Image (cartoon, helix red, strand yellow):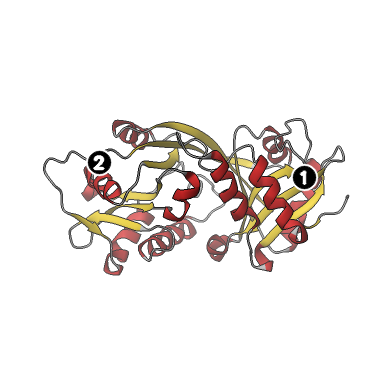
C-alpha cells in the first residue's frame, strides 16, 4: 500500500486492535488502574467520530512493507490561533503494536504532505519514550523537541485540615483576572513559550481561551480559586467520573494552574483545600503533569504525596 488511504472504513477493527494491544496508554502509570480499561477508553477515543476536515487517520505501509495505521487530527481550538494538527500515534496493523525495528520514514513524510495540503502549518507529536520507532520517525522528518513532560500521581487521602482557607469555585466574573494570570505568568519551558515560531500574543490568547473553557466546564470540571474578588491564582481539575468504572479506580487529573506575583504561596495553600474537595467527591488518586524543568511544582507535588509516573516528549514541525 504505497499510497495513504483513509482508515474510516476500518475504524471498528482498529478499535478492537487498539483496545487489546495498545502498548502504552495515557494513564497506565497510575498505580492500581485497570490497564485493560484504559486501553479500551483510549482506543474508543482514537477511533471515535471526528469531523471530516479534522480527520487524518490513514492506512499505509512501513518502509519494510508492513501495513500500518497513522493517527492524526486537526486541533480545532489550537487551529484558531496557528493551524495545528497532532499526531496521536503510528502503529502496525497487526500485533504486537510496539515494533522498535519498524521504519515509518516514507509513510510519515506522506502524512506530513497530506497535512500540508490541508493548510495545516504546525504539527505536534506527543511521544512516549518507549515508542522508539516513532521517536526515530519524528527525528528523521525534522521535528524539533520543544518540551519534555513529567507525569506524577498520588493518593487522595483523608484530609487533616488545620486553619481553613477560604476558597471557592471560579465563576464567569472571575475569567478576566484568571485569564490575565494565565497569559502573563509565562513558563519559558512549556511547549508554547519554548517555541520561537509561536507568536507570544497567540500563546497568551490561547492561555486565556483555556481559562474560559475551564471555567465553563468544557476543558475542566472545576476551577478552584481563593475566595476574594478578582482572584489571580487557580487550579483546575478534570474529574473523569465517566471513566472510573472502566479504570476500576477513581482518578482525577490536574489540568491547569497559575499564580500571579501578588498571590505567591497560594498554590501551596490551595493544595489541602483541593485535596479536601477531591476527597469529598470520591477521588482516590490525583494525577497531573508539568515540565521536567519545573522543579517547584514537582517538589510541591512530592510534598503532597505524589510520585513520578512517566515522561513524555513533545515535538513539532513547521510545514
When the figure is inspected, residue 79 is found, relative to residue 99, above or below; the finding is: below
Residue 179 relative to residue 122: left or right: left
When the figure is inspected, residue 67 is found, relative to residue 207, above or below; the finding is: above
Look at 46% across and 60% down and name the residue there: 206
Look at 39% across and 60% down and name the residue there: 214
| Label 1: few (<14), some (14–19) or many (≥20) C-alpha neighbours in 10 Å | some
- Rendered-image quadrant of the C terminus: bottom right
Spot occupied by residue 76 in the image (x, y as percentages of width and height): 57, 64
Spot occupied by residue 216 in the image (x, y as percentages of width and height): 38, 66
Disc 2 versus disc 1: nearer the observer:
1
Q: Looking at the image, which is closer to me, 205 or 285?
A: 285
In the rendered structure, find residue 93 and report the number of the disc placed on it.
1
When the figure is inspected, residue 286 is found, relative to residue 45, above or below; the finding is: above
Residue marked by disc 2: 268
Q: Secondary structure at mark 1?
A: loop
CA separation, marks 2 and 1?
46 Å
Amino acid at each position: 500500500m504505497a499510497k495513504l488511504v483513509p482508515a474510516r472504513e476500518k475504524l471498528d477493527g482498529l478499535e478492537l486492535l487498539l483496545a487489546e494491544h495498545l502498548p502504552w496508554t495515557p494513564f497506565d502509570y497510575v498505580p492500581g488502574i485497570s490497564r485493560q480499561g484504559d486501553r479500551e477508553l483510549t482506543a474508543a477515543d482514537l477511533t471515535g467520530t471526528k469531523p471530516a476536515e479534522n480527520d487524518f487517520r490513514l492506512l499505509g505501509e512501513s518502509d519494510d512493507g508492513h501495513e500500518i495505521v497513522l493517527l492524526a487530527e486537526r486541533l480545532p481550538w489550537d487551529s484558531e490561533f496557528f493551524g495545528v494538527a497532532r499526531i496521536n500515534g503510528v502503529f502496525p496493523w497487526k500485533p504486537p503494536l510496539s515494533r522498535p525495528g519498524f521504519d515509518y520514514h516514507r509513510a510519515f513524510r506522506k502524512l506530513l504532505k497530506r497535512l500540508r495540503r490541508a493548510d495545516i502549518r504546525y504539527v505536534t507529536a506527543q511521544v512516549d519514550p518507549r515508542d522508539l520507532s516513532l521517536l526515530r520517525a519524528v527525528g528523521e522528518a525534522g521535528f524539533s523537541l520543544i518540551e519534555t513532560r513529567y507525569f506524577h500521581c498520588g493518593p487522595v487521602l483523608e484530609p487533616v485540615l488545620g486553619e481553613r482557607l477560604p476558597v471557592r469555585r471560579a465563576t464567569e466574573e472571575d475569567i478576566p483576572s484568571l485569564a490575565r494570570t494565565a497569559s502573563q505568568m509565562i513558563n519559558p519551558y512549556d511547549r508554547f513559550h519554548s517555541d520561537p515560531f509561536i507568536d507570544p500574543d497567540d500563546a497568551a490568547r490561547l492561555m486565556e481561551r483555556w481559562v474560559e473553557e475551564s471555567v465553563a466546564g468544557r476543558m475542566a470540571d472545576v476551577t478552584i480559586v481563593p475566595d476574594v474578588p478578582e482572584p489571580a491564582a487557580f487550579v483546575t481539575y478534570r474529574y473523569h467520573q465517566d471513566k472510573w468504572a472502566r479504570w476500576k479506580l477513581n482518578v482525577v487529573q490536574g489540568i491547569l494552574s497559575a499564580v500571579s506575583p501578588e498571590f505567591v504561596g497560594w498554590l501551596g495553600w490551595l493544595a489541602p483545600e483541593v485535596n479536601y474537595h477531591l476527597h469529598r467527591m470520591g477521588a482516590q488518586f490525583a494525577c497531573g503533569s508539568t515540565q521536567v524543568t519545573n522543579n517547584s511544582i514537582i517538589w510541591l507535588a512530592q510534598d503532597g504525596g505524589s510520585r513520578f509516573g512517566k515522561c513524555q516528549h513533545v515535538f513539532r514541525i513547521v510545514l
